[in-house]
Amino acid sequence: VTIPPLDNFVRNVGGDHVGIVCLCTTQGPHHYQDNTQDAILLREADLFFAIGLSLDDKFADSIQIASHNPRLQYIKLGDKLRAGEDKRKEKLLLRFSSSPEQGHEEEHGHKHEHGDYDPHIWLGIPQAIALVEIIRDELKRVDPPHEADYDKNADQYIRKLQALHAYGKERLKDKKNRKIIAFHESLGYFAKSFDVEIAGVLEVTPGAEAGQAHLVKLAKECQEKDIRVIAVEPQYPTETSAKVLRDAMKDRDKEIVFVEIDPLETAEKQELKDDAKELKSVEWYDKKMRQALDNLAKGLP
């Protein structure tokens, strides 16, 4: 698999019948550089799950071609949602609401690095359930003797995802002001799942600093819309655009707090392995999502 959430979904559905390697651990899909070892790993693989939708395609396509594995089933899950026969699943995809905000593209000379669709599908609960269903069906296709186990495991995990959805709704139920500034365009599905409004985005492209004109516009938005929260990501430093915006609002006597919402694009390798004293690896996604919801519940006024 390319990213940690897919590791967790496959692990929960596949159980003891699958062996999993996650390529992106401490380095996320925006910056991952494939290597010869990746292609060697794929030579022994039966399935290769990626997101697609212009998130991990570039390096995943390269590895798949270099593997020279004729039996490998290469599954781009997001592309399956987009091109699938199930219109219910296709409707789960969100298009980016607009092109990069005026001034931002001019200052940095780039457009959004993704395609038309937001690829961060694992952060929405209905979308995560759809991914689990596709993973279940693909595992059944390549391993028919264990079909019943995959069905049972998927059903159990889907119920757990539904419980996570209910948990988030409950944690945020009393919050009247749900407007936030997101760090980059990764939280659309998360926001829709839990009725949060993304009022602005600091960085259209992760790691590319926002320009002055863009920050001035965001400061105006914060003032006019009473935005109190900036969602920050542990993968990127806060001593940059986020701090500049927060300090600018402090000068206007408006307190804004940082709330960490991990987009789950990276994970420490040990987090994806079972630890008898700490966390079972199958619980990683659930735990991280609950942490994000708890952080948001504490940060929202």
Image (cartoon, grey):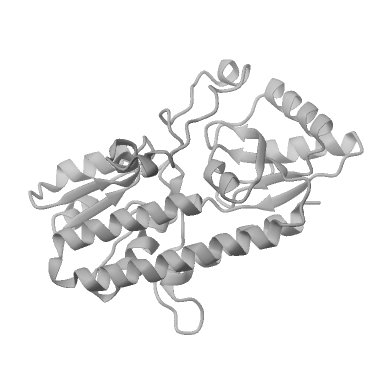
Say which residue appears at 55% left-offset and 24% top-offset.
98
31 or 60: which is nearer to us?
60
Image label count? 0
Residue 74 sits above or below residue 132 on the image: above
Residue 163 sits above or below residue 250 on the image: below
Say which residue appears at 15% left-offset and 65% top-offset.
143
Query: Which quadrant of the figure has residue 145?
Result: bottom left
Left or right of residue 79, residue 272 in this image = right
Residue 114 position in % (x across, y down): 43, 31
Left or right of residue 201, residue 256 in this image = right
Residue 300 position in % (x across, y down): 76, 51
109 or 150: which is nearer to us?
150
Task: Note whether residue 45 is visible.
Answer: no
Residue 8 sits above or below residue 256 on the image: below
Say which residue appears at 56% left-offset and 49% top-offset.
193
Query: Which quadrant of the figure has residue 52?
Result: top left
